[in-house]
Amino acid sequence: MRNKIIYGLGALAILLLARNIYLISNFPPERAQGMIFKIIFFHVPAAMTAMLGAAIALIASVLFLVTKNFKYDALAVAVTEVGLAFLAANLITGSIWGRVIWGIWWTWDARLTSALVCWLLYAGYLMLRRAIEEPTQRATFAAVFSIFAFLDVPIVIFSIKWWRTQHPQPVFWGGGSFPRDWSIVMLWNLIALLLLGTVMTLIRLRQEETQRELDSLRRMAHAL
Amino acid sequence: MHLLTQTLLIAQSAFDVEREMQRLQRNFQFLCYGLIVAWFILVVYVLMMVGRERKLKREIASLKAMLEDRQPK
């Protein structure tokens, strides 16, 4: 049943993405930036998916520390890993966009730097998990680290409001103007990427369950 | 004089059109690079997950077989 849900959601995400790509390719080039502006349809939803993943990881980590239930630890690691992939996609699309519009691949402004630090922190979280063998200790240390890493997320989001940055102000909720039909496609693309992220998280969660089963089998093998 | 001005204007317009076309082409190229790289990252991640799942299943199968062998009959 669970597998059917995963495959169903995956198929829905792919269909939505195909439809969105068709619609986006039919939009005219933006007046000032041309075709490259269309990268926004992936750059922004990828960032939103990654930030949502970080928020879910925070909640799951807090819940693990409170309840000591390992299903929250599994959820935290699953969403962190998926969020990291989306944040990498966001950073790279942003860098390519910057190369065309600013003439540079990278600049150490507050938004870009805090986003890179965020990526490094969550990569550190995954490395920390690999370094600790004992499951309870690993989950506890990782949960504390995840809560600490989340401190960077508001800095990433609000850096363009707090400081003067090379990165522009947000198109949404920041006074930018975006045609209504473009906004609708942007929203659909956000839904598609969120669905894709959900499917990846569910697969990753299933793997964590399998890993736990494997660990218990290993313990049994040692005991025999 | 008038003819010369018109010729220069046409030449300038042709140059502008050429430059604009080059800019659009470059824009399109970079858009393609961006989208290819973004999807490549996600596809690589999915492939890594598939590989991990296969490895886990293999390990579980071998451990179960080993445990069955060790069970006293």
Image: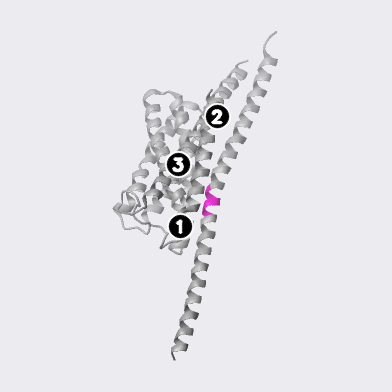
Q: Which residues are magenta?
A: B33-38
Query: Which residue is under mark 1?
Result: A28
Q: Is residue A11 visible?
A: yes
Three-letter amino acid code of the residue under disc 3: Tyr
Please say if A132 is above or below B63. below
Residues marked 2 and 3 touching at CB (< 8 Å): no
Q: Nearer the viewer, mark 1 or mark 3?
A: 1
In the rendered image, which quarter contains the C terminus of chain A? top right
Q: Nearer the viewer, residue B61 or A185?
A: A185
- In the rendered image, residues at marks 2 and 1 fall on the same chain: yes
Measure the C-alpha gap from mark 2 to mark 3. 19 Å
In this view, which residue lies farthest toward the bottom? Answer: B1
Query: Which residue is under mark 2?
Result: A207
Residues marked 1 and 3 touching at CB (< 8 Å): no
The spot of residue A66 in percent (x, y) is 36, 25
The chain ID associated with circle 3 is A
The chain ID associated with circle 1 is A
Please say if A7 is above or below A115. above
Q: Which of marks 3 and 2 precedes in the sequence?
A: 3
In the rendered image, which quarter contains the N terminus of chain A? top right
- SS label for mark 1: loop
Q: Nearer the viewer, mark 2 or mark 1?
A: 1
- SS label for mark 3: helix
Query: Which residue is under mark 3?
Result: A122
- In the rendered image, residues at marks 2 and 3 fall on the same chain: yes
Q: Is residue A92 visible?
A: no
Please say if A122 is above or below A174. above
Residue at 50% x, 31% y is A202
Question: Badge 1: how crowded within 10 Å, few (<14), some, or many (20+)?
Answer: few
